Image (spheres, rainbow, N blue to C red):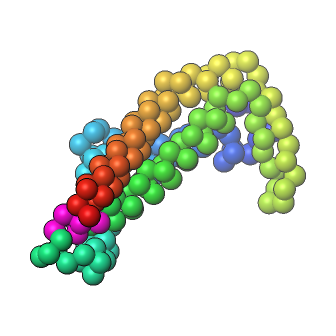
Amino acid sequence: MSLCPVPLEQQPLQEYQALRDSWFYQWPTLGWAAYGRRLLAAAGLGATVAVPVAAASFDPGQEPWLFSCAAVAGAAVLPSFLLLRLYLGWRYVQQRLASRTIVYEESGWYDGRTWEKPPAVFVQERLVSIYQVEPLLRRLRWSLVGMGLLYAAVGGLGWLCR
């Protein structure tokens, strides 16, 4: 952005590139297999806490279905929070890319300023928003819907087993 008063680290394209290049926020940019492996790893990490808690709550020998439902629901908490964090981060950048004006701060103190993007910059950033970020948000939304369905299924099974 030439003649742009917005500090470099607050410019939407720079924010987009920073997210795309970061270890955590690049997850939705990966192929489905690598993306799924990372979510499964997070679920495995969550299971290290969830399984003992589920076992203390429901005896696996006497109530295997309730134990399993509680363990699965607990293990899914960490990936759900990670997905939500990914979604919120990418959504923030998408909104800044798609906006005609940018709110920014010149110093560490709140001195909120606004800059209106020139038409060429606005069009370029809007295209990045539509063709680069929107597919990632779509993937994250579907993942969050999947987590919601998992919770609904586990809750329904747990309720039926009572």
Task: Name the residue at 68% across, 24% down.
Answer: 121
Where, by quadrant of the figure, is residue 129 drawn?
Answer: top right
Main SS class of the magenta portion in the image: helix
Magenta run includes residue 135: no
Residue 55 rendering spot, x and y as whole percentages = 24, 77
> 54 above or below 39?
below
Describe residue 156's horizontal placement relative to residue 98 as left or right.
left
Residue 146 rendering spot, x and y as whole percentages = 34, 43
Where, by quadrant of the figure, is residue 142 drawn?
Answer: top left
- For the record, the magenta segment spans 64-70
Residue 62 rendering spot, x and y as whole percentages = 14, 75
Task: Name the residue at 35% across, 52% down.
Answer: 151
Residue 6 rendering spot, x and y as whole percentages = 76, 41
Instruction: Looking at the picture, tell me which residue is in the foreground, 62 or 37.
Output: 62
* Quadrant of the frame with the C terminus: bottom left
Describe residue 146's horizontal placement relative to residue 138 as left or right.
left
